[in-house]
Image (cartoon, rainbow, N blue to C red):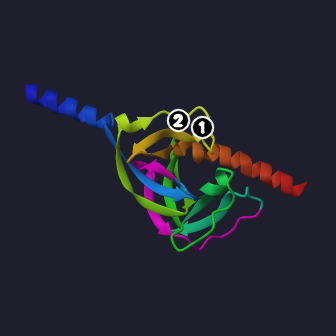
Amino acid sequence: MGALVKTDKSVEQAKLGEIQQFLTFSLGSEMFAVGTLSVKEIIEYGQLTEVPMMPNFIRGVINLRGAVVSVIDLGARFGRGETHVTRRTCIVIIEVPSGDEKQDIGVVVDAVSEVLEIPASDIEPPPAFGAKIRTDFIHGMGKVDGKFVILLDVGKVLSVEEISSLATIAAQGETQ
């Protein structure tokens, strides 16, 4: 029985996330990352249907195996202007918590880089200032090879409630 208790403790320590995996991608010259547990898949950019009266950061919707998935341009969401589509541009499908449910949202990124394992000891809290995006969007700053990777809080960046309210404001602005 003593061995069983030791195994439980090691499982608990693993759950605490000594090492976490992140999918890294670039937007312009900066490197960002999201936890791999929220990433469902990565698809080629294309086949978007534009939706009228949406904020500029909502590129449109795609048909993903019969499901309608909204696609957000992260560059525009961060106030940097629309992402220019290149051969490496892709859409990362992310599962976002929305109340008791989860919703799939696509995000346009310049290029996907790699999956990195970042020890918890190499993750710093978000900066109070100096980042070019809202600090509540940042989960932390991961140190990788002497450089920082911005770890995004997908629940905040892709908040379904906030995006819906921004879409409503955009629609009201166009009807006036």
Q: Residues within 10 Å of mark 2 (few under 14, many from 20)?
A: some
Q: Which residue is identified by label 1?
A: 135
Magenta stretch: residue 35 in it? Answer: yes
Which residue, as the protein is rendered here, is positioned at the far right? 176
The magenta stretch is 31-52
Which quadrant of the structure image shows residue 6?
top left
Q: Which residue is identified by label 2?
A: 126
Q: Earlier in the sequence, mark 1 or mark 2?
A: 2
Is disc 1 in contact with disc 2, using a CB cutoff of under 8 Å? yes
Residue at the (36%, 51%) spot, across then down: 116
Q: Is residue 112 visible?
A: yes
Q: Which mark is residue 160?
A: none
Q: Nearer the viewer, residue 13 or 160?
A: 13
Dot 1: element: helix
**Which amino acid, by three-letter code, is at mark 2?**
Pro
**Which amino acid, by three-letter code, is at mark 1?**
Thr
Q: Is residue 118 left or right of residue 94?
A: left
Q: Position of residue 141 (x, y in %)?
A: 47, 40
Residue at the (74%, 58%) spot, across then down: 54
Residue at the (66%, 63%) spot, across then down: 59
Q: Is residue 1 visible?
A: no
Q: Is residue 63 left or right of residue 167?
A: left
